[in-house]
Image (cartoon, rainbow, N blue to C red):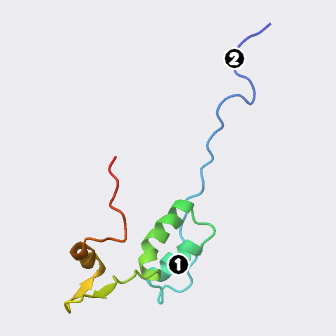
Amino acid sequence: MPRGGARPGAGRKKKVANPEYRGPEIENYATLTPVGLWLRILRDPNADITWRLGVADKLAPYMHARLAPKQIDDPQGELLLDDQSAERTGFSALPPPMRH
């Protein structure tokens, strides 16, 4: 009775490589902007997820505005930003960070 040796179907499966992503199909390069290219990659269903996540990270500042800091009128007539008023009054809306 034979023992050991190679058996059909045993072992780790071979890795299947995805074809290399060559970019989205672009008809007219004359009107293409960097943001337009990033949007095409982001919306391309054939793009690898790592490409799409990287593009989303780069594109976010151009698509979503940051909030401006709040300005508060000080009783003494000075215009303070929210951070400065918290330092001056000793009160902050957020609790101090916890140290472990």
Res 85 → quadrant = bottom left
Residue 5 in sight from this viewpoint:
yes
Task: From the top left corner, tell me how far across and down residue 38 is, in percent.
Answer: 49, 76
Q: Specify the quadrant that holds the N terminus.
A: top right
Task: From the top left corner, tell me how far across and down residue 58 is, in percent.
Answer: 43, 72
Q: Across the whole image, how many numbered discs are drawn on residues?
A: 2
Please give the name of the residue rendered at 70% of the width and 21% of the height, measured from the top-left corner.
6
Residue placed furthest toward the right: 1
Residue placed furthest toward the bottom: 77
Residue labelled with disc 2:
5
Q: Nearer the viewer, residue 49 or 1?
A: 49
Q: Nearer the viewer, residue 2 or 73?
A: 73
Q: Secondary structure at mark 1?
A: helix
Please give the name of the residue rendered at 49% of the width and 82% of the height, measured from the top-left corner.
36
Q: Residues within 10 Å of mark 2 (few under 14, many from 20)?
A: few
Return the mark for residue 62. none
Q: Secondary structure at mark 2?
A: loop
Single out the mark in the foreground, 2 or 1: 1
Please give the name of the residue rendered at 24% of the width and 77% of the height, measured from the top-left corner.
84
Please give the name of the residue rendered at 27% of the width and 82% of the height, measured from the top-left corner.
81
Q: Work out whether 80 lies above or below 100.
A: below
Q: Work out whether 4 lies above or below 7.
A: above
Residue placed furthest toward the top: 1
Return the mark for residue 39. 1
- Name the residue type under label 1: Leu
Q: Earlier in the sequence, mark 2 or mark 1?
A: 2
Residue 24 in sight from this viewpoint:
no
- Name the residue type under label 2: Gly
Distance between mark 2 and mark 1 Cα atoms: 53 Å
Task: From the top left corner, tell me how far across and down residue 55 is, in percent.
Answer: 48, 70
